[in-house]
């Protein structure tokens, strides 16, 4: 048989076995993901009862495409505007839960004598829950309308995003084994934030506009080709700047999620995603080695107990601290108590990059399979646990817990702070990245190129430096203004918070000063690059320039136009569907 036909034979074996096993699992009312894992185990190299795959290299390539399409699909379901509208309670609960489980996993790793990064990544895998399994359980048990279900769904979205970041960090650690890993990781996080915001902003400006402009000329076939082409292109771009293919697929998916064609794209690519996702999970199942499971059964048992008991407690406590009531906190915590499919992806990347030991892959899969089976029963158990705990609490304690709020203010005050945080942090991040990008391009590339032109030699050096500094300030001024600008609505919220409590004034002053400090840093950096005055003189000039930027009506108009166009594209999906 030729090599090409051998690849077809392997693919046929994978798909036929997956089809048969998943039909059986469907009859048993079990998740299809488990069926794929079992099918992979049956045709894998460790059982030798059924025909086995002959070319693992092909399967590895297909599974990589599966990861790309899964992350692309996650990005399509992710909406920046929806995330920002979900409230601080769910966001805080998600991050506290993730940090708590990373700490638990790291402690377990240290007890077993693992390295620092290996232990942290184990904790990261334990913190991941299964979106697919939980959403299916909510549908089957008719719980989608419950308040704890909404809280749980937001936590799952945050976990998916953190999983993407973890894969980036894994690549960073692998690349920095011969240097200082702490420094490399910090630089990688900074670079990640920079490129994510830059890609997102550029994508919001360009892609929705082009899709709207050529909407009448794009049919389903064109749209499918364009979407997949953009996905693979962003994968290549992400790899070229040192990030994983999964990150690139997620980024372009999240950009397309803001367009009016997002639901159409999701529908068109759904079948392709299902195909390659099935291949990925079958390839995961092929990695299960019974000998490894028998050797590490104590570790598997420890992971199962930690996931079912400790994770339930950590996630429940996190939701309670974030301001959820006791009932929703317990139900959400018990629902999240399983290891999700993202842990497979993290484990596969970590093992491939030699960041984790090879045996951790089948161990995590085994623990995930067990905890997935228990998910419906654990959701049902949450009710009796809450009822039992409620009976043991004194009325005073229960009343205090129900009245508890993280920010400790009135409902109106919490709502105002939430609005300020969402709008201000987004503006500061986006416009700081744009300011940095503009200045890097100008100072590192454009101005040195201009300096080489023949007629520039006639200009004195001080004159050229002055023109260069002024040009940089003018180019960056709309973005610098965006960092410190408060909208009329924000001013009203500030006034309302100060009327409610004078203590809020300190927080407002600190936040405003921090934003001005960011602008000062950019202006100071420009001036230091082109002038050799004493630093105190440059500080005074920088402060004067900042006041000029803030008071300039022209900058206000330029920024307002940019902000309006950006928000139009950002809300394009909601506005046109």
Image (cartoon, grey):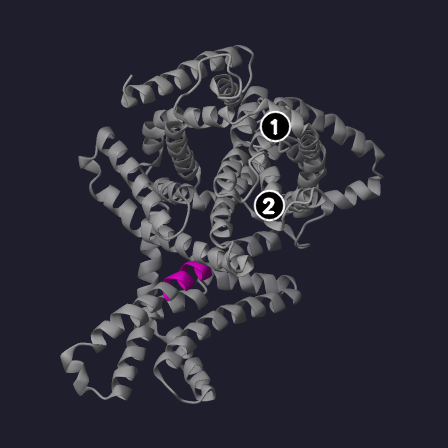
Residue 103: in magenta span = no
Picture coordinates of residue 317 (x, y %)? 70, 42
576 or 364: nearer the viewer:
364
- Secondary structure of the residue carrying tag 1 is helix
Q: Nearer the viewer, mark 1 or mark 2?
A: 1
Residue 69, picture quadrant: top left
Report the quarter where the C terminus lies.
Answer: top left
Which stretch did the figure color magenta? 427-435
Picture coordinates of residue 223 (x, y %)? 25, 34
Residue 58, picture quadrant: top left
- Secondary structure of the residue carrying tag 2 is helix
Residue 428: in magenta span = yes
Picture coordinates of residue 147 (x, y %)? 61, 34
Residue at (61%, 24%) from the top-left corner?
291
431 or 42: nearer the viewer:
42
Residue at (64%, 61%) from the top-left corner?
500
The Cα atoms of the two marked residues, 1 and 2, are separated by: 19 Å
Reading the image, the residue beneath label 2 is 118
43 or 490: nearer the viewer:
43
Along the horizontal axis of the image, is 577 left or right of 514? left
Reading the image, the residue beneath label 1 is 292
């Amino acid at each position: 048989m030729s090599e090409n036909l051998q690849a077809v034979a392997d693919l046929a074996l994978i798909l036929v076995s997956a089809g048969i096993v998943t039909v059986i699992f469907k009859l048993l009312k079990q998740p299809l993901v488990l069926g794929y894992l079992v099918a992979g185990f049956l045709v894998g190299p460790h059982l030798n009862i059924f025909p086995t795959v002959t070319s693992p290299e092909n399967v590895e390539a297909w599974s990589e495409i599966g990861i790309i399409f899964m992350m692309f699909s996650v990005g399509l379901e992710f909406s920046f505007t929806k995330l920002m509208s979900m409230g601080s309670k769910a966001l805080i609960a998600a991050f506290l839960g993730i940090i708590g489980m990373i700490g638990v996993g790291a402690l377990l790793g240290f007890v077993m004598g693992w390295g620092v990064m290996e232990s942290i990544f184990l904790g990261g895998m334990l913190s991941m829950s299964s979106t697919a399994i939980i959403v299916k359980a909510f549908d089957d048990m008719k719980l989608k309308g419950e308040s704890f279900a909404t809280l749980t769904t937001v936590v799952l979205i945050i976990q998916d995003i953190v999983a993407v970041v973890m894969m980036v960090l894994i690549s960073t650690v692998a690349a920095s084994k011969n240097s200082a890993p702490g420094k490399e990781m910090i630089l990688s996080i900074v670079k990640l934030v920079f490129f994510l915001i830059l890609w997102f902003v550029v994508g919001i400006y360009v892609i929705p506009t082009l899709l709207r402009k050529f909407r009448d000329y794009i049919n389903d076939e064109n749209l499918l080709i364009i979407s997949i082409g953009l996905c693979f292109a962003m994968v290549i771009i992400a790899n070229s700047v040192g990030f994983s293919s999964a990150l690139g697929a997620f980024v372009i998916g999240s950009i397309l999620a803001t367009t009016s064609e997002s639901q159409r794209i999701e529908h068109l690519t759904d079948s392709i995603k299902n195909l390659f996702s099935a291949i990925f999970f079958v390839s995961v199942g092929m990695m299960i080695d019974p000998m490894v499971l028998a050797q590490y059964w104590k570790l598997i048992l420890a992971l199962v107990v930690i996931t079912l008991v400790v994770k339930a407690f950590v996630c429940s406590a996190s939701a309670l601290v974030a301001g959820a009531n006791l009932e929703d906190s317990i139900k959400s915590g018990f629902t999240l108590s399983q290891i999700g499919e993202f842990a497979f992806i993290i484990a596969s990347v970590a093992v491939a990059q030699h960041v984790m030991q090879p045996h951790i892959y089948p161990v995590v899969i085994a623990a995930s399979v067990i905890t997935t089976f228990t998910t419906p029963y654990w959701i049902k158990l949450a009710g009796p646990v809450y009822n039992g705990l409620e009976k043991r609490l004194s009325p005073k304690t229960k009343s205090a817990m129900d009245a508890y709020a993280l920010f400790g203010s009135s409902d109106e005050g919490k709502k105002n702070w939430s609005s300020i945080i969402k709008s201000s942090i987004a503006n500061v991040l986006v416009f700081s990245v744009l300011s940095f990008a503009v200045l890097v391009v100008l100072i590192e590339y454009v101005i040195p190129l201009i300096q080489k032109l023949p007629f520039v030699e006639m200009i004195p050096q001080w004159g050229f430096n002055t023109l260069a500094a002024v040009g940089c300030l003018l180019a960056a001024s709309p973005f610098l203004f965006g960092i410190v600008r408060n909208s009329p609505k924000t001013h009203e919220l500030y006034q309302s918070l100060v009327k409610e409590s004078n203590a809020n004034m300190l927080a407002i002053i600190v936040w405003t000063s921090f934003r001005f400090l960011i602008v000062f840093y950019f202006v100071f950096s420009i001036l230091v690059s082109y002038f050799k005055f004493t630093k105190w003189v440059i500080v005074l000039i920088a402060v004067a320039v900042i006041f000029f930027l803030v008071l300039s009506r022209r900058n206000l108009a330029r920024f307002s136009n940019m902000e309006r166009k950006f928000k139009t594209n950002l809300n394009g999906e909601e506005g046109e569907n």
